[in-house]
Image (cartoon, rainbow, N blue to C red):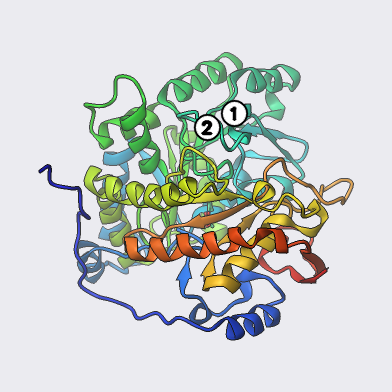
Amino acid sequence: MELPFAESYKMKVVENIRRSTREERSEWIKNAHYNLFNLHSDQVYIDLLTDSGTGAMSDKQWSAMMLGDESYAGASSYYKLKDAIRDITGFEYFLPTHQGRAAENVLFSALVKEGDVVPGNSHFDTTKGHIEFRKATAIDCTIDEAFHTELDHPFKGNVDLNKLETVLKKYPREQVPLIIVTITCNSSGGQPVSLANMKAVRRVADKYHVPVFFDSARFAENAYFIKMREEGYRDKSIREIVREMFSYADGMTMSSKKDAIVNMGGFIGFRHKEDFEKATTFNILFEGFITYGGMSGRDMNALAQGLYDGTEFDYLHTRISQVAYLGKQLREYGIPIQYPYGGHAIFVDAKRFLPNLPKEHFTAQTLAVELYLEGGVRGVEIGAIMADRDPVTRENRFPDLELVRLAIPRRVYTNNHMDYVAATIINVYDRRKEITKGLRILKEAPILRHFTVEMERV
Ligand code: F0G
C-alpha cells in the first residue's frame, strides 16, 4: 500500500483551548456588538479569524531568537535578515518594518501622492486604505474569473492585462507611481498569480515605464501553486520559483506574519538603490533606524529562519493540503465556496449560502456570526463591511462577492479541528432557510471600519 502523506513536523509545545456553550456564545457576541474582532480569544474555540501572526514557530526559530542582537545600529540580526532576504527573494536592498501595513505606509509615503492611481489585482484592505488615505485611487484589474466562485481556474489571482493597459493608457505616467500585484491574492480568495502573468505584467509595465511591486505576504504559497499547476515548473524547487517570481518585480512589501511564520514583522525589498534611499527617511520617521525599523533583533532572527521554514516544499504541501481537506468536505456537502481552494483559507460564498438575505443586512457578517454561535468558530467577513463606504459619495459599497473567510493558522490546528469546523458550517447550512434577518450598523469609523464597527440584529 502506498504510504500516505503526513505532517512534516511534530509537536513540542501545546496550548489548551476550551469549548463553550451556545448560551455563553450568544451573550458574548451580543456584548461584542456582533463584531468578531471584539471577542476575547478565550471566547473562541477554533480561531480562523486570520492566518496572520498566528502561526506556530519552529524550534529553529525559537532558538534563533536567543541569538538576537539588540544593538540599535548594525546588529548582526539585521545582517542575518538581509542575507536571508537576498538569498530567498534576490532583492539587494531592504528596510525592516513592524508589519506589512507599515511597509505600505513607508513605501507609499515615498511614492504615492494625491490624485494618483495604483492599478493591481484586488488590493488588500490595508493597501487600499493606505492609497485612499493619500487621496489616491486603487484600481482593481483582477481577471473576471476571480469573481465567479464556482468557476475552475488555476490562477484566479491573475491581473487582466487589458484592464491594466487601459489604466496605463488613460493616465499619464506621473499619475501612476506603481503597479501592485498581490501574491497570493487575498481579497479574491487566496488565489495565486501565474508566473506567465507576472512576466506579462512586467512587459506591460516596461512599456509604460511604471515600476511593479509585489505585495508578497503569501509569496511561498503562490510558488507552491505554480509548482503544482503551471506548465514547466513541476521539477523546479519552491526557492527557484520564488527567485523567478521576484525577478519580475522592482520591489516587494512583506507582511512576514504570513509566509515567514513569525508573530510580528515585515519588510520592504528593493531592486534599485534610489527607491531604497527615497523610502529610508520615512522608515526612520515611522518605524525606526534602518537596521531595525520596528523589529527587535530576536524578531529579525526568527524572521530570517522563517523565510527558510516557509519555503520548504514539505511544509507547504502539509499546509495547503490541510486547507484543501477542509474545503473538500464543504464542497462535497454542496456548500458554496470559492473554488479552487485558496492557499491560506477557505472562502464561503455568503450570498449563495444565504440567498434570501438582502445585501443591506450584511450577508457575510451575518453568516460569520452564525458560525460563531453554532460552534465557537471565528472567521472574518470579507464583504460590504470591509469594503467601507465610497470615499466620495459616502454610500455603502456592496462588492460583487460577500465572503466569509476561514483562514487557517500555520502549523497550529490538526485535521480533527478541520472536521469540527466542517461540521459547524454544515449545521448552519442545514438551517440556512431560518436565517432571514441580518445585522445593521450602529457605529462605524470613517475608514477600515470592520475592525471596530458596532452592530445589532435587524
Ligand atoms: N497585504 C496582504 C495581502 C495581507 O493579507 C495583509 C494582511 C497585509 C498586506 C497587511 O499586513 O497585517 O502585517 O499589516 N492581512 C491580514 C489578514 C491582516 O488577515 O489577511 P499586516
274 to 125, vertically: above or below: above
Which image quadrant is residue 69 in?
bottom left
Residue 81 at x, y = what percent? Answer: 30, 52
- The mark total stands at 2
Residue 63 at x, y = what percent? Answer: 20, 68
Number of residues whose C-alpha sits closer than 10 Å to that of mark 1, classed few (under 14), some (14–19) or many (20 or more) = some
Can residue 412 be seen from the camera position used here? Answer: no
Q: Amino acid at mark 2?
A: Lys
Number of residues whose C-alpha sits closer than 10 Å to that of mark 2, classed few (under 14), some (14–19) or many (20 or more) = many
Q: Secondary structure at mark 2?
A: loop
Q: In front: 36, or 312? A: 36
Question: Which residue in the rendered view is the most extreme toward the right?
Answer: 393
Q: Residue at x 43, y 51 (%)?
A: 329
Q: Residue at x 33, y 34 (%)?
A: 242
**Residue at image mark 2:** 156
Q: Residue at x 53, y 59 (%)?
A: 426
Which image quadrant is residue 296 in?
bottom left
Quarter of the image with the C terminus is bottom right
Q: Amino acid at mark 1?
A: Glu
Residue 333 at x, y = what percent? Answer: 49, 50
Whether the residue under disc 1 has CB within 8 Å of ligand 1: no
Tell me how far mark 1 sits from mark 2, CA to CA: 6 Å
Question: Which residue in the rendered view is the most extreme toward the left?
Answer: 1
Would you say the residues marked 1 and 2 are in contact, meaning their CB atoms lie under 8 Å apart? yes
The tag on residue 160 is: none
205 to 98, vertically: above or below: above
385 to 271, vertically: above or below: below
Quarter of the image with the N terminus is top left
Q: Secondary structure at mark 1?
A: helix
**Residue at image mark 1:** 145
